[in-house]
Image (tube, coloured by chain):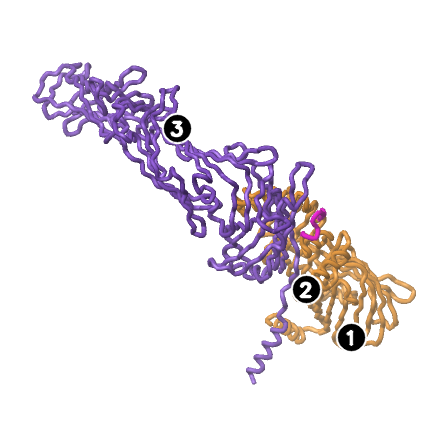
Amino acid sequence: MKIVYFFCFIFIFSACKKEATNWNSNWEIPILKDTLDLTNYYNDTTLSLNGSQIDIALSRTLLDIGLAELIKIPDTTISQQFQTVFTVNNVTPGFTFVNSVKTHDLDLHDIQLKKVRVKSGRVKLKVYNPLNTDVLYQVELPGVSLNGQSFIQNFTVAAGTVQNPTVSYETIDLSQYEIDLGGAQGLEFNKLQSKLTLKTDPNGPIVSIYSNQLFKYEASFQDLVFDYAKGYFGSAILDEQQTFHLPYLDQIIAGSLDLPNLTMDVLIENGFKVALRGQLSSMQATNTQGQSVALQAPVIGSNFFLPPALGSWSTLQPSTLPLHFDANNSNIENYLENLGATQNIAYELQVNPWGNTAAGHDEAFPNSRLKVKVSASMPLQFSADGLTLQDTFELDIKQDLNKTHVSSGAILLEATNAFPFATDLVLHFLKDGQIQHTVLADAQISAANLGQIDPVDGLQKKTSKLKIALPEAVLLHINELDQVLVQASFSTLDPTTGLAIMQEVQANAFLAFKLKLQLQTNVRP
Amino acid sequence: MRYLALLFAVFFFQQLFFAQSQLLLEANGAYNSSTLPKKIPQAFFYGGFLDSSFLTQTHQALTARNTFGLQMHANFQYQTNKTLSKDPKKLASSWSWLFGAGQEQYSGMQFSKDAFGFVFLGGAPFVGDTLNFSNTRIQSISFSKVGFGVYNPQNQTSLQFNLIGLQNLIDAKLTNTSWFQDPVQDSIHINITGNGRYTTRAFSAIGLGLDFDYRFNSETDSEPIVFQLKIQNFGFAYQIAPLEQIQLNGTYHYGAFDLQDLQQLQFSNTLDSALLDLGLERTALRQWTLLPASIQLSKMVNQDSTIRVQAYYGAQFILRQTYLPLIFAGAHFYITKNWQTGIGAAYGGFGGLRAQAYSAFTFNKYQILVRTDNATLQKGASIYLQFKCDL
């Protein structure tokens, strides 16, 4: 009986439990207002206005290297030292006891330099004094000069001992210094001379110099970059394979793009006074579906040669080699229409392909560059058929359904389109990478050719209003959803036939849009 | 339960040692509005869903300025027969001691039609309109009291001093506040000037209050007319723990983002920026608070009279901006010696015109009074219960 009373008690009081006070309120929140156009690409070597149409006037420098990249000098340390054979007693103050020149060989592999000019870099000098009086060190690099003055550095190094010689440091900027690497006679290469002079302190005591006392200096050349070099630059092969990803193309998941006849020119410039061999080994584009297209043309895989540049300094004239790609000599159109997000390029570059035929007279100047330029020109027109881009955005929205929460909503989009393509929008809501809900816009962003010509700006444009409803099911499970995938599908359709046709992009075309969030909120105070 | 046991203990104690003392218990609960249908406050009391069509109709029926209020109290008073003096020559011999305790609650608000629409319908229905929230005010206070005093059994006049303990306090107002959502520019403009103070900490303030019930006669040809001046909860409380005060004075403009800004958006920064523009300031505040004193002057009915119909009337003020002066009047009917009843009308307070009704049942040693100040239950509800017992 007691249990019956208990359940009666529970029933009575549970019946008194009230439903939460709640009501729905409606909100419309402006989120986004912007205009997308191509203004930023006009006259910046990408697009150009040509009357009422836009031309692709693409000009890009793919490779641009100078002497610093061509000849890289490793950090090098040279040293010179002096040690007496026998003890010298009663050395008077101010006595000069060393005055010798030493020649150092620089290890530059097959590069044989006779003369260089330092663009940037430094030398770090380090001298040791084991004598029990101050010693005046004079370090001279006879081949290193600035404005005709040889590099000379004087140190007064305090007294030291054999066990603990006094060490003195000095770091000197070598920018604009010229270095003669021709040795004493000027006929050699990679030779650097140094001269060390030691003198006891003129105001110091009389001392003795013993045979176990080592007088030494070290010069460390660090981070040297040259802007002028003369000699033989070697014949090393620069063999590179590069993979790079093109933005946006990796977001295309379906559809096709048809481009008009396209020509592309590649210009190779050699600003060094050295012969050059090059080879474009392969070019391959792979799209997001994994389909690869290799660029096929006579120049692919073949060597090309460029003679040395002419002139010097301000009169330098680079030698050039133009390469032309069009539908007649290549599959450039297929290559580009494959919309390869992943581009793989392999190439070789080699200076002095026939060895030191210039007898060490290769020369590079500050304005010497090795460049690869690509240029293309055509009207900006294309045919798109369901060309679909998608992107994924993180979603981190939490709401407690027992408190005030959004119960339903919609995304309202108003777009004015002056581009020739129509756009369909789809949103997928994902959980752990799996699609849980899919919502479609109730209309498409219409192409400009369905609209009228605006007499104000002379553009044909069409305004569309569309709504993407966010059903209650999405908002009920919003806590579990972690990503939203947005798909936009572009088509340039003929309004009458419904078939994809080639469409030109109007000059000053734009897409203006306003996005609002329409929310119904269940308020639970 | 402990309080009930204590009450009975007092009852039996006085039965043993005193005579002709009186126990008075009264409780009141009332809510009312000038314009809101009672379905809305009932949804807050009892729960439930308020559908949009009803809220839209309600919104359309609102006036520019609307009020809503809620009052509750429960008081206990024990009037002893122990006089202040046993010397009949002294005035104090006609006064006896009394003790009392109670709980009081007052909530009142004034709001504009736009404020109601914004809260209950949202901003979407008003895109393109300027919503005016000015002169919106919320005042709420609840407190406990315990005290002692004296009363005069002959003329029923009483005076009671109370120690006050504040339970919670809210006082907020918007003086110059508007919201405009521009559908063309896709922007929202908020202009706000307001402040609010609140505490929910029990006994964060203590104070003193006075309850005063003064009866006086006006002689007529037939029989005296008795008037009552009743002042309750006249006093102050001081915050021993500070209130939190929030002040807003500024304007904020929200506009749709461009793509670049949206990609770099950090919601917390946007919120901080908005609050900075709106001039948000938080401070701790100690202050004196005037209690919601009620001052009522009324003509009373003589329940001992056998006249069949008597008139009653009066006026009541509460020292709060959200409470309008209340006037009331009605007729009292003598049915039998044990049952007397009355009907009347009231206007003011938190609402408009409404009907009153009451009945009093008198027995040998006790009386029960049941009254409602909103008999038709149009825009609120009211119940008053009084139990008087001669011990």
For mark 1, give the secondary structure: strand
Color of chain B here? orange
Label 2 sits on what residue type?
Ala
B202 left or right, relative to B182? left
Question: How far from the left and from the top, in percent, is residue A118?
Answer: 32, 24
Q: CA distance from mark 1 to mark 3?
A: 121 Å
Considering depth in this image, is B223 or A286 the residue closer to the camera? Answer: A286
Q: Identity of the amino acid at label 1?
A: Thr
Q: Are marks 2 and 1 in contact (CB under 8 Å)?
A: no
Q: Secondary structure at mark 2?
A: helix
Q: Residue furthest bottom?
A: A1
Q: Which residue is labeled 2 in the image?
A: B43
Residue A313 falls inside the magenta stretch:
no
* First to last magenta residue range: B123-132
Few, some or many residues within 10 Å of mark 2 (<14, 14–19, 20+): some
In the displayed structure, A180 sits above or below A411; it is: above
Give the labeled residue for mark 3: A320
Residue B237's x, y, as percent? 64, 53
* Colour of the chain lettered A: purple
The spot of residue B378 in percent (x, y) is: 77, 64
For this view, does A382 lie left or right of residue A374? right
Q: Is residue B125 visible?
A: yes
Counting from the top left corner in percent of width and height, residue B115 is at 70, 52
- Viewer-proximal residue, B78 or A366? A366
What kind of residue is marked 3?
Answer: Thr
Residue occupying image coordinates x 55% and y 45%: A383
Q: Nearer the viewer, residue A109 or A523?
A: A109
